[in-house]
Amino acid sequence: MDTKTTLNSELSSADLCRANGWKVGRVLQGTDGQGKTCDILIVVVGEDEVIARCLTCKRKHNSDVWDLTFREWKAVEDLAPIPMRVGP
Ligand SMILES: [Zn+2]
């Protein structure tokens, strides 16, 4: 499968996840323009939006809507998907 590039994509973040087979629990890695690399965990793939949590920055509550088109993201294929907590 060809991986769609995320940087400046015309697709929504959620469509990029669907096109690339990136599901909830998958970890993506991307480097910003300053050379900082973050690993993010996909928490929700919505209609257009993706909610993700940065595993690198380690803030306590930092699940947030994540626009994947600001960086080039790649799946960290070596990591097994992380099981999600379900419910309270
Ligand atoms: Zn980060």
Image (spheres, rainbow, N blue to C red):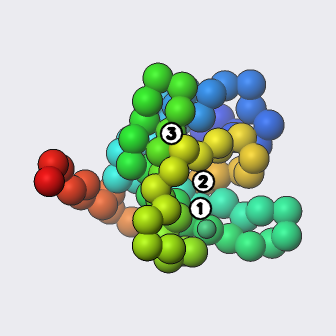
Query: Disc 3 beta carbon < 8 A from ligand 1?
Result: no
Q: Of residues 74 and 88, which is closer to you in this image? A: 88
Q: Quadrant of residue 35?
A: bottom right
The reply to whether discs 1 and 2 touch (Cβ–Cβ < 8 Å) is: yes
Label 3 SS: strand
Label 1 SS: strand
Q: Which residue is mark 2?
A: 74
In the image, what residue type sits under mark 2? Answer: Lys
Query: Measuring 43% from the left and 65% from the top, which residue is drawn there?
Result: 61
Q: Quadrant of residue 6?
A: top right
Q: Is residue 55 above or below residue 74?
A: below
Q: Position of residue 79 (x, y in %)?
A: 39, 66
In the image, what residue type sits under mark 1? Answer: Gln
Q: Which residue is mark 1?
A: 29
Query: Measuring 46% from the left and 56% from the top, which residue is drawn there?
Result: 63
Label 2 SS: strand
Q: Is residue 10 above or below residue 51?
A: above
Image quadrant where one finds the C terminus = bottom left
Q: Which residue is mark 3?
A: 50
User: In the drawing, does residue 51 fall left or right of residue 5?
Assistant: left
Marks 3 and 1, the one that precedes in the sequence: 1
Q: How far separated are the C-alphas under marks 3 and 1? A: 15 Å
